[in-house]
Each structure stands twice: as structure tokens, then as C-alpha cells.
Image: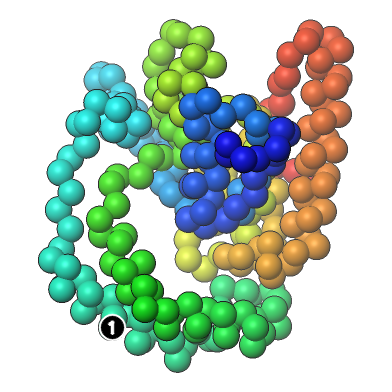
């Protein structure tokens, strides 16, 4: 984010969505004026899961464990075993690229054209593709969306009496306005439940259902663009109105139609 202009609004999907949230809330970063997530990956904890996990104990976030060098030791499978498994998976998926993608684009399968499938095939044949496949087994535990977005539960902010801006700066969390443009027909997970969980995390998160699959921005690009435009106008309007009244910013979590 160091090279981004002021008032940047990062947009990202799937695994890259986690990166976008992390970058937006990185310590020392204050250039973002919003965040858009589209079927973002990563774990989201419900309030019930947080209560069951922590009980009477204080919450220990992945961010705190990382800062204190207390993360559990990484125990990936032997490299050769991971390489054999990754090579086999790539070999299985290559001839099925088109059918897999069409399944992920249920509303507009025609968006799965030769350019898209050709690019995916080309990338899978790159000499370094296998290293990408097996790298997942070496990654540390990911931070939950609760941590990254400064949720009212499941984040260090929810258990601290300190000023939230101080906590956000130290832990690295994004507390600004966020749009979740969620493809509700995503076959890879319960997209509707994930959208609901996002909306329950805290104020300032708006959920917009999109009648698409795993990649709504590609499958129904106009729908996503319209959702983003509407959200930007509405949030800017609310900020201006609240700013006139109290000098602050407030917006509630909701699902816009």
C-alpha cells in the first residue's frame, strides 16, 4: 500500500481478498478509503464459535501469536510427498478446466471463454506451478476475518478497553467501510451463510447479494460494478451527513437490495 494513492479502495476476491484486507489494515497504512471483497476466502467465526473457543479465557489472536513468536511449529508433509500430490492434482484438473469453470459460473457460463481457460492452462504449465500448489502446506495459520476486520467478537478489539484506533494500528486491522459483493450461487461454500457472517461482524460492513457463482466480478461484471457504484455513493452521502451533524462517521451493517 506504500505506492497507492490516497483514498484508494482495494478490490479483491477469493484468497486475494485476505491479502486486500491485510494490506488495508497494515500498520502505518492510512491511504484506503474503503474495501470491496468478492467471495473472499478465509475463516469467519460466528459469535457462538468465539464464545465456545474462548470460554472464560482471554482471546489470543494469530496476530498476537505472530508478534510474540508463539505460533505453533509448522509441520508440512515431506516435500516429495507434497510434490507428488500436487502434480497429480494438476494433471487431474488440466483436462477439466472448462467444466470446472462453467460450474463456478452458473448464471453466465458463456463467460468461460477460450481466453480464460487458455490462461489457466498456460499458468498450470508454468515450471513454478507445482511450487505454488505445495506452498499451501507450509503457510502459517491464517488470521480470521474477525481479526482482520476488527469485529465486535473474535478480535482483540472486542476484548480490550483501549482506543480502537490504537489497537488497529498495533494489530493491523481494517475498521473502515467495506462492501461484500457476494456471489450467492458459489458452489464451493455456503456463500449465503458467509455473507451473513460478514454482515454480523461489525458496523460499516455492507453485504450485496449477486446472482452469480465464485467469481461474480467476472461472471456478472456489470452487476458488481453497479453494486460498487451504489455503495460508494451511499456511503459517501452518509459520511457527509454524519460529518455535518457530529464530525464522525457511522454506518450500519446491512444487506442492500
Residue pointed to by mark 1:
88
**Quarter of the rendering containing residue 233:** top right
* Vertical placement of residue 145 versus 217, above or below: above
Point out residue 181 in the picture as x, y percentages from the top left corner.
67, 51
**Quarter of the rendering containing residue 77:** bottom left
* Residue 75 makes an appearance in the image: yes
| Image position of 227 (left or right of 255) | right
Point out residue 36 in the picture as x, y percentages from the top left corner.
65, 45
Point out residue 17 in the picture as x, y percentages from the top left corner.
53, 50
Crowd class of label 1 (few under 14; some 14 to 19; many from 20; radius 10 Å)? few
- Identity of the residue drawn at 46% across and 18% down: 167
Q: Residue furthest bottom?
A: 95
Q: Where does the N terminus fall, quadrant-wise?
A: top right
* Residue 193 makes an appearance in the image: no
Element under disc 1? helix
Q: Residue furthest front?
A: 3
Display colour scheme? rainbow
Point out residue 49 in the picture as x, y percentages from the top left corner.
36, 36
| Image position of 251 (left or right of 243) | left
* Vertical placement of residue 139 versus 83, above or below: above
Amino acid at each position: 500500500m506504500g505506492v497507492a494513492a490516497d483514498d484508494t479502495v482495494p478490490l479483491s476476491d477469493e484468497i486475494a481478498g485476505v491479502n486486500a484486507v491485510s494490506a488495508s489494515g497494515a500498520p502505518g497504512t492510512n491511504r484506503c478509503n474503503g474495501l470491496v471483497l468478492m467471495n473472499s476466502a478465509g475463516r469467519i467465526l460466528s459469535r457462538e464459535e468465539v464464545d465456545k473457543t474462548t470460554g472464560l479465557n482471554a482471546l489470543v489472536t494469530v496476530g498476537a501469536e505472530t508478534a510474540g513468536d508463539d505460533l505453533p511449529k509448522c509441520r508440512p508433509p515431506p516435500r516429495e510427498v507434497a510434490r507428488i500430490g500436487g502434480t497429480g492434482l494438476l494433471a487431474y484438473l488440466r483436462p477439466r478446466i472448462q467444466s470446472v469453470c462453467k460450474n463456478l459460473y452458473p448464471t453466465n457460463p458463456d463467460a468461460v471463454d477460450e481466453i480464460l481457460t487458455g490462461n489457466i492452462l498456460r499458468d498450470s504449465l508454468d515450471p513454478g506451478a507445482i511450487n505454488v500448489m505445495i506452498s499451501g502446506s507450509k503457510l502459517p495459520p491464517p488470521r480470521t476475518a474477525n481479526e482482520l476486520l476488527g469485529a465486535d467478537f473474535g478480535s482483540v478489539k472486542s476484548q480490550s478497553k483501549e482506543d480502537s484506533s490504537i489497537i488497529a494500528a498495533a494489530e493491523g486491522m481494517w475498521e473502515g467501510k467495506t462492501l461484500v459483493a457476494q456471489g450467492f450461487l458459489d458452489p464451493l461454500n455456503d456463500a449465503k451463510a458467509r455473507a451473513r457472517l460478514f454482515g454480523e461482524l461489525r458496523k460499516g460492513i455492507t453485504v450485496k447479494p449477486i446472482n452469480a457463482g465464485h467469481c461474480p466480478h467476472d461472471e456478472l461484471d456489470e452487476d458488481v460494478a453497479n453494486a460498487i457504484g451504489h455503495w460508494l455513493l451511499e456511503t459517501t452521502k452518509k459520511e457527509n451527513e454524519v460529518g455535518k451533524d457530529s464530525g464522525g462517521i457511522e454506518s450500519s451493517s446491512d444487506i442492500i437490495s
